[in-house]
């Protein structure tokens, strides 16, 4: 339904002319009183029905109405038509119908009644009106020039819209006033040709009022008016957009041509069958042939016969799926050799025509390097593999075929990594691969592998993801057979078990023997001490010497048994400390008094650099054991008349004890052996005049005791015969 504004209807109702509103389908929406009176005279008063069904009009007149409405659909102008009508009283008269668009949906028809006119006059008026409508609505310049090339007529609206000039500004002006200066010579030639031959054609530039350029394509024809004056009518079309597009297209072609001519790749285009449609100049460098020579040969003529099937499959795939393809194949050079090419192709479609365009490059050097690398990889004892994102194998070296028993044909038909991993390890392998695809760096993993025949072996797999554009596309890695290592580990585990049993037997023996020897030895040592005290007052030197020898031997044996017992306690984690507050200075002096007889026997000089007193919480007996071990070593490894110094100092909550000598010193290899169980440095028979006796347990136990106190022990020596400094430090407890 259409609603007419009451103000509009009131206005139309008061007008002395007939007015009618219809829609495009002819439905009558409104008519005023004058319209009703007019239609009553014709015998069919208007009703709110369809205008095209009104009985007062012939079918031809109705068709003309419909055509006029169609015209208004594409034009903002009005349309006028005239019909000869007869009233119900037989009176002839003419009706002039002026149709125009009232709104986007409605057509307004203004009807004027007039006396009959001469038919020829009506035709002429109609033609004039139609000509005016045509010239006003054509999207071209219409210009008429006189013989002086002055403007006499233009279709004003279009000229003003395009150039900014009103018709009054153009009339009487020479046409060259509006031509781009550089084009005036060729326009002058075009005009002369038109006047001479009767017609002409040209393309040139005109200037707008603002100084902008418009490209026009003009067709001109000369004629004579009624007075015999020679004139020229020009029909000019604005082709600025077309020229700009052609310019841009040419620039794009030039850029593309420059780009193609300055890249190393060869660009080819072909119809997908056997004929090339374009080959860039680089083909000469790649094949030795000129582009035109190569085009005559066809697509497949120079391709290695073994590679033709895969090239054809790739072409079929492009046409079928429209996918981009990357292909490697061999092409015969003009000199008879074959070169490796890489082609990256795409399908392009221009209208109904399909073409394949591809970039070709010579990869011979890279391919030869790959072949050499593959040969080297095939020599490796390990399996090298590569798989896609779905874990399908895409590459492996030859040893994989030997190891797993699969053939090349089976590989090409498709093999997955997981089918070669034992069932018990398969889920773990999948989980590890998923982690690898996320970029997590994992340690090499060990799996049980399965051969084609069902046999198994153990392998260690080290793999990394393959990324493209930041996304994982596959995995590559190394498979190392560790079967021999697994067997060796089992043997080692078995031997370790036996060794642990033997070591336990040794510990039990040492512990039992030490305890069994300790009681009788204590009695023997005590008895010898009594004999020594008894014979000291008797002048029997020979007996006294024998007793002293026995006393020293029993003491050494007693110390050895104590050391063995301490070692067993360490092994059994039964070595504990009994800490008390001790004067470390007094302990050092007491320990050295224990060795005084040995110092005097070796005729050494002893120096002290210690404070008067230094209290610290330690296990008195164990630290005394350490001091005696260190000073005893200094005495034994220093030739007679040597100098031994004992120093104590505190610094940064630590107390340091140094035992220095100027004896035979230590070399680098000997230092590495110190502080290890039963590692005794032998100097016997080397003429060094030192005491070589010892069990090799003293420094080992000293290190354990110091470290149990939270301290550290080490040795310093500049080499042979340059003395040695043994230092230990203990934390100062508060």
Image (cartoon, rainbow, N blue to C red):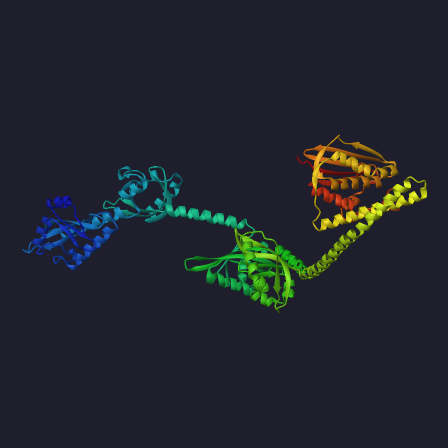
In the picture as drawn, the residue positioned furthest to the left comes out as 89
- Seen from the viewer's position, the closer of residues 580 and 510 is 580
Q: Residue at x 23, y 53 (%)?
A: 70
Using residue 375 as the reference point, say whether residue 724 is left or right of it.
right
- Seen from the viewer's position, the closer of residues 318 and 582 is 582
- Residue 334 figure quarter: bottom right
- Residue 689 figure quarter: top right
Q: Residue at x 41, y 60 (%)?
A: 352
List x then y, in percent, for residue 284. 58, 55
Using residue 276 as the reference point, say whether residue 695 is left or right of it.
right
- Seen from the viewer's position, the closer of residues 172 and 349 is 349
Using residue 36 as the reference point, say whether residue 545 is left or right of it.
right
* Number of dots carrying numbers: 0
List x then y, in percent, for residue 133. 23, 48
| Residue 150 drawn above or below residue 443 | above
List x then y, in percent, for residue 110. 15, 48
In the picture as drawn, the residue positioned furthest to the bottom comes out as 453
Q: Say if residue 689 shows up in the picture.
A: no
In the picture as drawn, the residue positioned furthest to the top comes out as 612
| Residue 258 drawn above or below residue 165 | below
| Residue 327 drawn above or below residue 186 | below
Give the quarter of the figure containing the C terminus. top right
List x then y, in percent, for residue 336. 63, 61
Q: Say if residue 571 shows up in the picture.
A: yes
């Amino acid at each position: 339904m259409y609603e007419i504004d009451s103000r509009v209807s009131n206005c139309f109702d008061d007008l002395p002319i007939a007015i009618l509103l219809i829609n495009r389908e002819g439905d009558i929406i409104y008519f005023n009183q004058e319209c009703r009176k007019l239609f009553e005279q014709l015998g069919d008063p208007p009703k709110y029905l369809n205008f095209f069904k009104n009985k007062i009009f012939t079918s031809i007149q109705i068709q003309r109405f419909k055509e006029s409405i169609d015209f208004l659909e594409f034009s903002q102008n009005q349309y006028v038509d005239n019909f000869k009508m007869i009233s119900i009283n037989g009176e002839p008269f003419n009706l002039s119908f002026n149709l125009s668009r009232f709104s986007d949906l409605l057509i307004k028809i203004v009807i004027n009644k007039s006396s009959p006119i001469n038919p020829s006059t009506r035709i002429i008026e109609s033609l004039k009106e139609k000509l005016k409508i045509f010239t006003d609505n054509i999207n071209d310049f219409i210009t008429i020039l006189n013989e002086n090339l002055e403007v006499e007529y233009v279709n004003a609206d279009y000229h003003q819209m395009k150039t900014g000039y009103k018709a009054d500004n153009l009339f009487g002006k020479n046409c060259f006033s509006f031509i781009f200066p550089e084009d005036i010579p060729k326009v002058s030639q075009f005009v002369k040709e038109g006047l001479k031959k009767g017609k002409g054609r040209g393309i040139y530039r005109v200037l707008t009022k603002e100084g902008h350029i418009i490209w026009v394509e003009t067709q001109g024809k000369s004629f004579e008016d009624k007075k015999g004056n020679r004139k020229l009518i020009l029909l000019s079309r604005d082709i600025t957009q077309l020229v700009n597009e052609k310019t841009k297209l040419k620039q794009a072609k030039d850029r593309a041509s420059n780009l193609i001519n300055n890249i190393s790749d060869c660009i080819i285009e072909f119809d997908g069958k056997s004929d090339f449609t374009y080959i860039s100049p680089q083909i000469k460098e790649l094949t030795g042939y000129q582009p035109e020579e190569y085009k005559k040969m066809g697509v497949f003529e120079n391709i290695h016969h073994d590679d033709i099937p895969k090239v054809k499959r790739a072409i079929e795939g492009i046409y079928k799926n429209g996918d981009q393809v990357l292909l490697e194949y061999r092409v015969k050079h003009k000199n008879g050799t074959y070169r490796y090419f890489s082609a990256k192709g795409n399908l392009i479609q221009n209208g109904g025509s399909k073409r394949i365009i591809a970039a070709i490059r010579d990869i011979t050097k890279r391919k030869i390097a790959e072949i050499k690398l593959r040969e080297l990889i095939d020599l490796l004892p390990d399996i090298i593999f590569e798989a896609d994102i779905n874990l399908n194998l895409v590459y492996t070296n030859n040893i994989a075929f030997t190891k797993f028993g699969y053939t090349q044909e089976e590989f090409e038909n498709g093999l997955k990594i997981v089918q070669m991993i034992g069932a018990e390890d398969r889920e773990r392998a999948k989980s590890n691969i998923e982690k690898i695809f996320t970029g997590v760096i994992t340690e090499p993993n060990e799996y049980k592998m399965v051969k084609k025949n069902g046999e198994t072996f153990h392998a260690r797999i080290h793999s990394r993801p393959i990324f493209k554009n930041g996304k994982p596309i596959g995995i590559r890695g190394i498979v190392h057979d560790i079967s021999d290592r697994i067997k060796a580990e089992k043997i080692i585990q078995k031997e370790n078990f036996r060794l642990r049993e033997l070591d336990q037997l040794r510990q039990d023996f040492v512990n039992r023997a030490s305890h069994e020897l300790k009681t009788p030895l204590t009695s023997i040592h005590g008895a010898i001490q009594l004999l020594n005290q008894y014979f000291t007052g008797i002048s029997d030197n020979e007996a006294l010497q024998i007793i002293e020898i026995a006393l020293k031997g029993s003491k050494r044996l007693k110390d050895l048994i104590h050391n063995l017992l301490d070692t067993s306690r360490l092994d059994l984690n039964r070595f504990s400390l009994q800490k008390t507050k001790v004067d470390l200075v007094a302990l050092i002096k007491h320990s050295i008094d224990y060795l005084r007889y040995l110092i005097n026997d070796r005729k050494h000089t002893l120096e002290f650099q210690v404070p008067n007193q230094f209290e610290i919480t330690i296990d008195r007996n164990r630290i005394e054991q350490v001091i005696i071990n260190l000073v005893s070593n200094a005495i034994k490894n220093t030739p007679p008349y040597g100098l031994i110094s004992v120093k104590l100092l505190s610094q940064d909550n630590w107390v340091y004890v140094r035992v220095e000598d100027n004896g035979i010193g230590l070399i680098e290899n000997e230092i590495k052996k110190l502080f290890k169980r039963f590692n005794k440095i032998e100097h016997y028979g080397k003429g060094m005049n030192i005491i070589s006796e010892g069990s090799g347990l003293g420094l080992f136990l000293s290190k354990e005791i110091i470290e149990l106190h939270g301290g550290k022990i080490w040795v310093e020596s500049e080499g042979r015969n340059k003395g040695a400094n043994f230092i230990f430090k203990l934390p100062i407890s508060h």
